[in-house]
Image (spheres, helix red, strand yellow):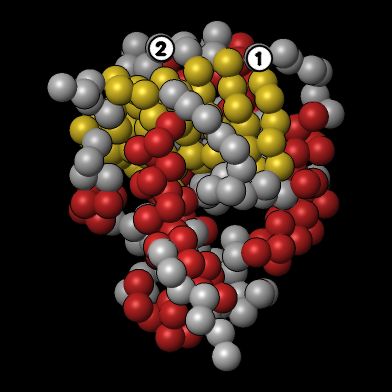
Amino acid sequence: MDRDIRDGDDVLRLLDRLFPVDADRWTGGAGSQWWDAFYADRDRAVPFFVDKPDENLVDYLDRGLIAPGRALDIGCGAGRNSRYLAEAGYVVDAVDLSPAAIAWAREHAADARITYHQGDVFALPITGPYDLVYDSGCFHHLPPHRRVSYLALLDRVLAPGGHFGLTCFTEDEGSALSDADFYLRGGLEGGLGYSPESLRWIFSRLTEVELRRMREDTAHFGKDFLWTALFRRDQLP
């Protein structure tokens, strides 16, 4: 007889176990195995395999919406956005669940301004504060209950006055199931779709700077199916 629920983290781990180990692209070791297989074929026709940063990230810097400092790149993949940020003057911690992705990222010329970390961003000893937290395609692969972990991470590591940038599936590209239905069906259907209203509600503790569709196909599977959002954490009183 198991009695292993004592705090919020125990509840989150219990909810993780409601999904079969091969049901999604994040839960447990199965998530890293799925992404390792995905990254194994480097000739795959995937926009984010191209060594080019997200157009919105370039745009933020070009317009002065963000400024170089310390950055956390969540779901860094082969490191294309991390390298761009480092070239722009950031010192970057880059995290990915997949050992294959991190190995690919490290094959590029070493840059002392980038430190790569393989593992679960919620479990790694990541310490802020960061002037920028950037996520290109990780958030929409998380089960709904892990938004709690995600927001807690932002609360912990995002500096006052810092920015959070996000690229994620629209409701046209990702699954439109309700949160409850993912648990009833036991899978995430390849990724969750979000509406602008849902993103604004989830990240309502931050101040919206911009939320729009991606203009170029530089991150995922089609520019019309991706939101790009930039939020700011206001200075503490």
Say if residue 62 shows up in the picture.
Answer: no
Between 137 and 49, the one nearer to me in the picture:
137
- Which residue bears the numbered disc 2? 67
Quadrant where the N terminus sits is bottom right
Report the Cα–Cα distance between label 2 and label 1.
15 Å
Quadrant position of residue 173: bottom left
Q: Quadrant of the C terminus?
A: top left
Q: Pointer 1: what residue?
A: 113
Image height of 90 relative to 126, above or below = above
The residue drawn where x is 30% and y is 39% is 212
Residue 128 image point, x, y percent:
48, 26
Residue extending farthest left: 237
Residue type pointed to by label 2: Ala
| Image point (77%, 46%), residue name | 99
User: Would you say the residues marked 2 and 1 are in contact, meaning their CB atoms lie under 8 Å apart?
Assistant: no
Q: Is residue 104 visible?
A: yes
Classed neighbour count for the residue bearing mark 2: other residues with Cα under 10 Å, few (<14), some (14–19), many (≥20):
some
Q: Tag 1: residue type? A: Arg
Q: Is residue 145 above or below residue 119?
A: below
Viewed as shown, does residue 105 lie left or right of 83? right
Tell me residue 104's x, y (percent).
Answer: 80, 37
Residue that protrudes farthest toward the top in the picture: 89
Q: Secondary structure at mark 2?
A: loop
Residue closer to the observer: 232 or 1 = 1
The vertical placement of 217 against 8, above or below, is: above
Q: How many marks?
A: 2
Q: Residue at x 77, y 54 (%)?
A: 36
Q: Extreme bottom residue here?
A: 1
